[in-house]
Amino acid sequence: MIISHRHKFIFIHVPKTAGSAVSAYLAREFGPWDLQLGSWKDALANGAKANRLALIAMFRHLPPLEIAKTLVRNHSVDSLAGAALSRRFAGRLSDHSSASEIEAFDSAAWKNYFKFCFVRNPFERAVSLYNWHYRKATTRPNFSEMLRLIEEGAAERESINWRSWQLYTRNDEVVVDFVGRQERLSDDLRIVCDRLGLPFNNRFLTRAKANPTRPDIRNYYQPGDRERVARLFGAEIEHFKYRFPD
């Protein structure tokens, strides 16, 4: 999630839609008071630096010993930016804040800034969500079981951050100015940059979290799973005319 006062934009980060890549790209152009929550590791690896807001948060919200240990280990103090900002804005904003949450936090920015997000085919996104959520688990449910947990409301206990449509809509109406698609990430991010007057160079559009061996999602789907995904993400599927990939 980004609120940029320098460039007057708000980016809503929908989980598993290349949002980290978008955040890492845009962070290179930050002003001193621009706010980014989440994706800091990717942003720093892509050449961004902690800005004034992040540095102030570090020294106000992180223990001095934590900062000292970071420096002793020859790590840049910039690496603490993500943790510091998360603590600074805890309870008000998060990595994947919704439109309503951002508007409540800064109504003037919401009213006047360019707002955008990226989406992805829900049939593919569900598989990506599954692999990411259970990437470190020693045991994991199968894909069908994860969908059942989400549909039955038990996903919150597992902290499965599955929501998408709810983040950039209100009463089922899209409330952002532009919705890009992961399927055409480079072209749509170029449109955003042109709109904001920012340079675009595809060389800096990294995909750090992308799976280098893209799985065949058909191997995950069992009978009934397509219908369950269609129920969970029906509004998004219908609005963007997504279909199960051939």
Image (spheres, rainbow, N blue to C red):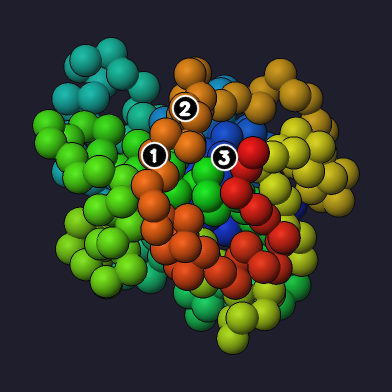
Residue that badge 3 annotates: 18
Q: Which mark is residue 88?
A: none
Give me the residue at 35% from left, 37% from top.
Answer: 131
**Which residue is the extreme one toward the top?**
74
**Looking at the rendering, in which quadrant would you find the C terminus?**
top right
Does the image show residue 85? no
Residue 170 location in percent, x, y? 59, 81
Q: Secondary structure at mark 2?
A: loop
**Is residue 196 left or right of 102 when viewed as pictured?**
right
Instruction: Give the CA distance from mark 1 to mark 3.
Output: 21 Å
Question: Circles 2 and 3: CB distance less than 8 Å?
Answer: no
Give me the residue at 71% from left, 61% from top.
Answer: 240
The amino acid type found where label 2 is placed reads Pro
**Is residue 71 left or right of 209 when viewed as pictured?**
left
Question: Circles 2 and 1: CB distance less than 8 Å?
Answer: yes
Residue 27 location in percent, x, y? 60, 38
Location of residue 9 with respect to 139 vertically, above or below: below
Eye-nearest disc, 2 or 1: 1
The amino acid type found where label 1 is placed reads Tyr
Residue that badge 1 annotates: 220
Residue 73 location in percent, x, y? 21, 15
